[in-house]
Amino acid sequence: MRKIVFLLILLWSTGYEAMAQKTIVQYLSGTDKDHTVNWDFYINTGQKSGSWSKIAVPSNWEQQGFGTYNYYKDTQNPEEQGKYKYHFRVPSSNSDKKVFIVFEASMTETEVKINGQLAGPVHQGGFYRFKYDITKLLNFGADNLLEVTVSKKSTNESVNQAERKADFWLFGGIFRPVYLEIVPQTFIDRIAINAQANGKLSLDVFAVNANSKHVIKAQVQKLNGQPVGAPFSINASADSPKITLKQQINHVLPWNPESPNLYNLVVSITGPQGDIHSIKQRFGFRTAELRLQDGFYVNGKKVVFKGVCRHSEWPESGRTLSKDISLMDVKLMKEMNMNAVRMSHYPPDQHFLDVCDSLGLFVLDELTGWQAKYDTEVGKKLVKELVVRDVNHPAIVIWDNGNEGGWNTDLDNEFAKYDPQHRLVIHPWEKFNGTDNKHYPDYNYVTNAVLYGKDVFFPTEFMHGLYDGGQGAGLDDFWNLMRRHPYFGGGFLWSFHDEGVARTDRNGQIDIQGNAAPDGILGPHREKEGSYYTIKEIWSPVVIGNQYIPEAFDGKLSIENRYIYTNLNRCSFKWQLVSLRLPGNSVQGKVNASGNIAPLDLEPGCKSYLQINLPAGWQNSDVLYLTVDGPDHKEIFTWSWPLKSPGEKLNRVAAQGNVRPQVIEQDSSLIIKCDAISYYFSTKTGYLQKVVTPKSAIDLKDGPVVAGIKHTFKTLNHYAEGQDYVVEPLYEGGPMFKVKWIFSPGKPAKLSYQFSQQGEFDFSGITFNYPEELVTGMQWEGRGPYHVWKNRLKGQQFGVWHKNYNNTITGESWNYPEFKGYHADVYWVTVETKQAPFTIYTTQKNTFLEMLKPAKALGSGNNNTNPPFPDGNLGFMNTISPIGTKFQSADKLGPQSQKNVQLNYTPVSGSLWFDFR
C-alpha cells in the first residue's frame, strides 16, 4: 500500500509540473559577459559619442569603448546618456498570453519604450531587477522595436548620492541580461518561502487573475525530482493576491554552509480545465536568528562568520559577469576556509547567489547606499525589488540596509514586508539591532569590545587590504582576541579582490585609482596574494597547535575542531615524510614514507590529539607534511614542519680542494684566495667588497653590517689559524658587534657574527648589498613561496622553492608571488645572477632572508603599508618589521605588530656559510 501511495504522489507531483505551462523566457540580450547580443547604440559624450553604432548587451558601455570613466563621483560628463535600439519578434502563438520585459539591472535611470510607447514609469536605481507588462504594446508575429534610454545621472538626487558618490567604479549601461517572460493570463507571479530547519514550511504564493475556482498546489522535491513528503494545496481567492500554504516536511536535511542541502519546490495553479501554470524554485531548510547578548544562530548553532566583502567586477567587463566567475569566486572563498560573504555594496548577480546556495556560503545581501541614503519613496521600491528577487536563497541570512551611514531608517521595517523569514536587518558600521558592526576597529577597540561589549560583535569590514597590508597581516592576533568576545559573531575582511578595470581609453591598462581600489586578497584577475594562504590557515576549521616538532616527538599533534556543524570523522588526514633536494641538485624531493590517519571522532568546539604512527628513522627526513581534507574532499590546509636544524645541511656539502688559503694585501684591499676563489675586503671599512671566481666576479659587498645600526670601523685583523685563515674586522661605537670570517680549504667561507641591540627596533640582523639589476632569481629551502611580515607568518609551507626575479608591487602589479621581501625559516638560498650563482647557508632556526627591498606603491598616501627595510638589500634577519593597513599603522594591530626587542638582553649570535664554488 505504501508503494502505491508513493507512486500516486510521484505521478501527481511530476504530472502537474509536466502538464502545467511553464514560464517561457525569451532573451533579447545575451546571458552574460561571454554571451552577448549586439544592439544599436548611441552615446552623447565621451568615447565614440555622437553617432549610432553597435554595442554588446549586456555590458557596461565603458568596457565596450564608449563614454566616460568615473570613480567615486561623476566628475567627468555627469550627464552621460546612452540610447539603445533592438528589433525582436514574439510568436503569434503567444498572443493569448501575458508578456513582461525584464531588466536584471541597468545603471542608473532607465526609460523603456516598446514600439514608441512607454512600457511604464522610468526606473531609478542601477543594481536592481525591474519589469514591465508590455502585452498590449506588442505586435505578435511581427516586428517590435525596443528603445531604451539609460542615464548615468538620475533625476532623483538621492539615487545619485546613494549609488554614484561612492568608493567604487561608476559605470553606465544595461549590464545584466534583458529578456521576456511569457506566461498564461492566470499565473504565479512569485513565491516567498519560509522553510525552517525542523521541516516547517510556509509558502506565500502571489497569483495573478486567480479566483476561488483555482487551486494552488505545491510539492517539495529532491534535486533529482524525487518527491519529499506529500503534496499540499489550497484554494485561491480573488480577494487576496497572496495565498499562504503551510506544511510539515519530515526528515529534511537542513542547509548550512558545511552541508548545503537543497531541494526544489514545484508550485502550480490549476483551474476547472486543468493545470495552468507552474514554477520551480530551489531552496533550503534553515533557521536564522539573532539572539540578543548571545550570538547569531543558524539551525540552532552559534555561527562565526569567516567572511569577506566582494564587489561584482571583472577587469575587462566591469560589472557584467558570468556564472563561471561566480563559481570561481565562491570556490576561492571556500578554499580560504571562509563561510560567508558580504555583498559590497549592492545585490549581486543571481548566479552568484545560486552558487552560494549550492556550494555553501552565508550571504549578507545589501541595499546600496555607500555613505548616503535613498529617499523613502524610491528606497521602498528598491527594497521590494531586492527582497522579492532574493528572498528564496537559503544562503542569505542578513539584509544590509546601506553602508556606513547610507541607511534610511524608514526602510528598516520594509524588508520584512516581503520576507516571511523576517531576516535580521543591520546597518553595516553601526551598533544597531543588537549588533556591533564597527568598521576597521583597531586592536584596542576589540579589546574594549571583549571587556565591555553588550552586542553581538561582527565587524562588517576589518583588516583593510590596501596593497600588501591588512587581510592576513594582523589577523592572527585579531582573531584570537575576537574569539574571546562573549557575543562573538565573526567578521568580514575588506576586500576580496582589487577592483582594477582594464580601461578601453588606455589600451587595456588596468586602473586601480591610486590607493582607492587595490584592497583585495586577490588581484583583479584573482591572482593570489600572500594573505590568501595566511587566511586559509588562520580560518581553517581544523586547527593544529604544534608550532615545532621536537627531537623526541611521539607522533601526537594537538587538534581543535572549529567547524560549526561538522564532526572531524567526516574529514580525512594524511601525512608524508620528505627529503628535500640540496642546492644545485636538479633531483626533486623524495617521499620517504606516507600514510593515512584513522578518522577522528571530534565534535565542533572540542580539542584532542591526532596520532601519527611514524616509522623508525623518521628523523632522517627533512620535512613532515600533514594534509587535512574536508567532507567535500577538498584540501583544508597542509601543515609542514622541518625536522632538522639548518646547520645539518652543511654536513651534506662536499669538500672541494685542499690548498691552504693565500693572502694578498693590495692598495686598500685585503685579498684572501681560497680554492681558486678570491675574497676582497676593504681595509678602510672591514666590509667584503667583492668575490672573484674562475667564472666571474660577484659584486656581493658592503657587509656584514648590523641592520639599522651604525658602527665605526677600527681595524682589520687577519691571521692564520692552522690550515685556516681568519679575517676579523673590529668595530667600535654603538652596541657590541663582532665579525669573524674563516676560510678553510675545500669548504665554503664561514662568517660568524655577534651583536646586541637596545630598546625597540623595526628589524635586526646582518646585511650585505648586491646590485639588484644583476639578480635573475633565487632558489631556497624555507617557507614559501610568498614573502612574509612579522604579523603575517602563517600560511607558507616549508620546502624548496624557486622564483624568477620580478619587481612586483603588491596591488599595483600582479606577478605573484612577489620576488622581493622577507622570507621565513630559510635554511639556504642560491642567488641567481647575471654574473654567477652563489649559495648562502644559515645555521640558526627562524632566520629570515631579506631579498632586496620592495618598492613603495605609487599611490601610497602614508607609510602604513610600506614597512621599513634595512639599508642593505641582502640580509639574514633575526627579526623583521610588521605591516599596517590603509587606516592603521602596524602598532595598532596587536602584539605581533609591535616593534621588536632583544630577548632578555642576550646578544644575537649566528653564522653563515658562503659557497661561490
Image (cartoon, rainbow, N blue to C red):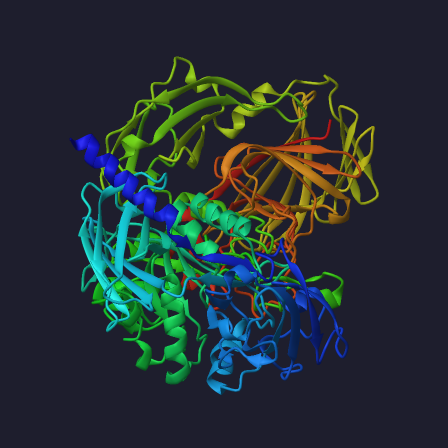
In the rendered image of this protein, does residue 618 appear above or below residue 690? Answer: above
Q: Is residue 267 left or right of residue 355?
A: left
In the rendered image of this protein, does residue 535 appear above or below residue 547? Answer: below
Q: In the image, what residue occupies the spot 70% across and 81% down?
A: 44
Residue 369's image quarter? bottom left
Which residue occupies the extreme top position in the image? 616
Front residue of 565 and 267: 267
Residue 110's image quarter? bottom right
> Is residue 876 something one can see in this rendering?
yes
Front residue of 790 and 299: 299
Q: In the image, what residue occupies the spot 69% across and 51% down?
A: 807
Q: Is residue 660 left or right of residue 179?
A: right
Front residue of 585 and 72: 72
Which residue occupies the extreme left position in the image? 1
Q: Quadrant of the C terminus?
A: top right
Q: Position of residue 343 (x, y in %)?
A: 43, 62
Q: Position of residue 230 (x, y in %)?
A: 21, 44
Q: Position of residue 99 (x, y in %)?
A: 48, 67
Q: Is residue 301 left or right of residue 32?
A: left
Q: Give the total number of marks visible in the rendering.
A: 0
Q: In the image, what residue occupies the spot 31% across and 66% down?
A: 206
Q: Quadrant of the N terminus?
A: top left
Residue 510's image quarter? bottom right
In the rendered image of this protein, does residue 55 appear above or below residue 16? Answer: below
Front residue of 582 and 647: 582
> Is residue 896 something one can see in this rendering?
no
Q: Position of residue 344 (x, y in %)?
A: 46, 65
